[in-house]
Amino acid sequence: MKKNKFSRVVVAIVISIVFQLWFGCSSSYKPGRTYLISGQYEEENFGLYSYILFSQKPDKEDSARYAELISGYLNKIPELNQLTNYLNDSSINVVYFPVLEDPLSQLDSLAFKEQIDWLMSNYDYARASAYLNKFEDDLFEGPYIVSYYKPLSIVDSVLTEKYLLQDFSQVHPKVISLWVDAFIRQSSQTEYWNEAHLRTFSNTLRNTIAIAAEGLQEVGKSFSWWEESLKGWIVLK
């Protein structure tokens, strides 16, 4: 019964998010995913640059968060090469996943869970660490999603403003998917650092998690703590 209730909640949330994406601000960035292979650098001229960043190899507790975040990345964000067939680069939020080697030939022959395992095993932690060091915050936990208006590889000073950072270190694995949806929505705004956008984003996310918590006992137990910690999980400068 609880499972059915939660399924209905998820369906309602997905429908709501789809409507927001279709009827939201017409001037927005559309997310497209691709891999950032070791030794290669980002392409320029995209409207926004986002990154899935892991600060360290996961322990047993963190593995579920990493896996859920990768699952959301693969399931919810279209491939970049499909998007560029129809959109100008300047209207795309390219979402990079750093890897040690090109995964495309590897992933095609793997089941979905095996794809997630492969991406976790072949993640480029050195590059991720270098990119996390470009922010003024102490980013030693995570995982994180960060967004900035130009490639992080060409940033040569510490970033103090106009970036979007989401910290998943305290997010329950079962609701990470909802956070990914909300992050995509917020980072799609052309002025994603705008305070009014952040307030709307925070309120929508708060309501979404509150509804989901009704169907998830373990999430509900920590919901009060979550409300107090919201500002620590989403950093907008």
Image (tube, rainbow, N blue to C red):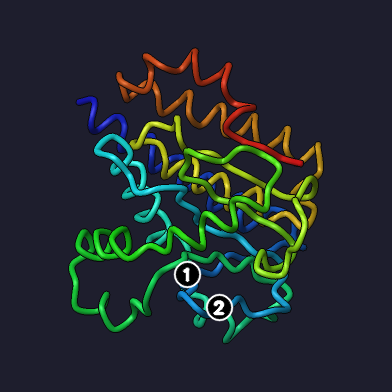
Report the front residue among 190 and 3: 190
Looking at the image, which residue is at 62% across and 36% down?
234
Residue 183 location (% of width, % of height): 58, 47
Query: Label for residue 132?
Result: none
Q: In this view, does 181 lie above or below 125?
A: above
Quarter the N terminus occupies: top left
- Residue 114 relative to residue 101: left or right: left
What mark, if any, has residue 83 been given in the picture? 2
Q: Which residue: 51% across, 63% down? A: 127
Which residue is pictured at 38% across the width and 18% down the height? 220
Q: What amino acid is found at the position of numbered circle 1 in the picture?
A: Pro
Q: Where is residue 94 in the image (x, y as percent from the top left)?
A: 59, 68
Q: Where is residue 149 in the image (x, y as percent from the top left)?
A: 74, 62
From the viewer's perspective, is residue 120 above or below residue 205? Answer: below
Dot 1 corresponds to which residue? 78
**In 3D space, how far apart are the residues under numbered discs 1 and 2 (Cα atoms)?**
7 Å
Q: Position of residue 223 (x, y in %)?
A: 45, 17
Total marks in image: 2
Label 2: few (<14), some (14–19) or many (≥20) C-alpha neighbours in 10 Å: some
Answer left or right for 11 relative to 55: left
Q: Is mark 1 on a helix, strand or loop?
A: loop
Q: In which quarter of the image is the C terminus?
A: top right
Horizontal side of 13 relative to 10 (left or right) equals: right
